[in-house]
Image (cartoon, helix red, strand yellow):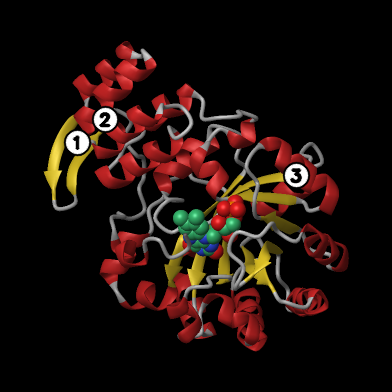
């Protein structure tokens, strides 16, 4: 079965709803949550292919998944095809496809030939795609996520060149590598979509379901991807205008191993649910018990949270206080902690 290609071909779906790769945030726990709210396809955070190949510690820390965590695309950062293929080889049994990051605009990435720098070296991108397609079965997708070039015709030309090498789909973040908060260029994404035969996923500025629908209708893109929008409202693709309280409760019922991420996500999710004063207090909390007590009182949901707290237990660890919740992960492929610590804020 080719689940990702089938997803794009599913005539019952207007478009495929996609969660973006987000360093630190699009991890297993968050993917579990958003799959409960109509998200069809998830990307892992970018994983550096060379470290993944060379270091058992990196492998242990950077990728965590389970049998329910599908369909799943693993995104690698790579500046050469051999790291890309070797890393893909190790992880391919646990995912549905591999994506090459061609959009990271950070200085370190550009200096070392990663991310958006690859747009200037399309031969490396094409080499990665060709080699992947020659080696792995056709039910595993190969894709790239890229930013626009300054000249729209060059963006179209690049996508056509990549398509010719056998790519499965292309994600286009509608900004150039130097643009930060400008509105995305939907016109160029539309042009790319009309110029290639493979599915295109639009990315950028999708803050609610209406944005997703109108961008899909305007550009014709078969996929719509959200990053910051879904981080702030995990119920976005299910049509919720702000985070539904059920998502907060569901988050507390997912097994967490790292207090900082557990808390950070709640800070994002509750941004529009709490008053300014309440946010100030909530953001300072440092233990899972305090977080839970706070949410119990704010959202008047004592029974659910109290029973979880009785069943859960707090653990002390190097990254702070951990909360072991009631729902345990099944068939975890490998353990993930904070290997990407150094890349935090890379994309913000
Ligand atoms: C916290 C954070 C982490 C990100 N990490 C990645 C990443 O690992 N790989 C990637 O291709 N893009 C990454 N991005 C960029 C997003 O995937 C997306 O392209 C960008 O935020 C624009 O989409 P948005 O307007 O929906 O936020 C990240 C963005 C954020 C905010």
Residue 2 to residue 217: above or below: below
**Observer-nearest of 56 and 219:** 219
Residue at x-position 64% and y-position 78%: 134
Residue under label 2: 291
Q: Say whether disc 1 or disc 3 marks the residue closer to the N-terminus.
A: 3
Q: Is mark 3 within 8 Å of ligand 1?
A: no
- Say which residue appears at 27% left-offset and 26% top-offset: 292
Does residue 267 appear left or right of residue 113 in this picture? left
Q: Which residue is mark 1?
A: 287
| Quarter of the rendering containing residue 153 | bottom right
Q: Residue 94: x percent and y percent?
A: 47, 56
The percent coordinates of residue 336 (x first, y second) are 31, 55
Q: Image check: 251 left or right of 140?
A: left
Please, is residue 30 above or below residue 240 in the view? below
Question: For disc 1, does the CB lie below 8 Å from ligand 1?
Answer: no
Q: Nearer the viewer, residue 232 or 201?
A: 232
In front: label 1 or label 3 = 1
Distance (Cα) linking label 1 and label 2: 6 Å
Distance, label 1 to label 3, CA atoms, is 40 Å
């Amino acid at each position: 079965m080719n689940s990702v290609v089938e997803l794009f071909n599913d005539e019952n779906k207007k478009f495929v709803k996609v969660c973006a790769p987000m360093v630190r945030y699009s991890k297993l726990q968050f993917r579990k949550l958003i799959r409960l709210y109509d998200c069809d396809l998830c990307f892992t955070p970018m994983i550096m292919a060379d470290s993944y190949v060379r270091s058992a510690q990196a492998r242990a820390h950077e990728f965590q998944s389970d049998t329910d965590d599908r369909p799943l695309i693993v995104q690698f950062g790579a500046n050469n095809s051999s790291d890309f293929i070797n890393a893909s080889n190790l992880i391919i049994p646990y995912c549905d496809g591999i994506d090459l990051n061609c959009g990271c605009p950070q200085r370190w990435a550009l200096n070392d030939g990663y991310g958006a720098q690859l747009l200037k070296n399309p031969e490396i991108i094409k080499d990665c795609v060709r080699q992947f397609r020659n080696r792995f079965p056709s039910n595993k997708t190969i894709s790239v996520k890229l930013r626009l070039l300054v000249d729209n015709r060059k963006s179209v030309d690049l996508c056509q060149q990549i398509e010719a090498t056998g790519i499965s789909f292309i994600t286009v973040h509608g900004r150039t590598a130097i643009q930060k908060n400008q509105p995305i260029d939907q016109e160029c994404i539309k042009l790319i979509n009309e110029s290639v035969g493979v599915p295109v996923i639009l990315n950028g500025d999708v803050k609610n379901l209406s944005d997703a629908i109108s961008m899909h209708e305007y550009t014709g893109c078969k996929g719509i991807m959200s990053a910051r929008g879904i981080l702030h409202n995990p119920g976005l693709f299910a049509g919720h205008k702000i985070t539904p309280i059920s998502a907060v409760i569901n988050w507390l019922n997912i097994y967490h191993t790292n207090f900082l991420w557990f808390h950070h996500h709640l800070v994002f999710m509750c941004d529009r649910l709490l008053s300014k004063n309440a946010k100030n207090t909530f953001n300072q909390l440092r233990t899972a018990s305090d977080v839970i007590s706070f949410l119990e009182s704010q959202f008047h949901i004592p029974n659910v949270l109290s029973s979880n707290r009785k069943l859960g237990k707090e653990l002390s660890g190097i990254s702070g206080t951990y909360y072991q919740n009631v729902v345990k992960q099944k068939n975890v492929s490998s353990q993930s902690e904070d290997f990407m610590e150094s890349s935090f804020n890379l994309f913000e």
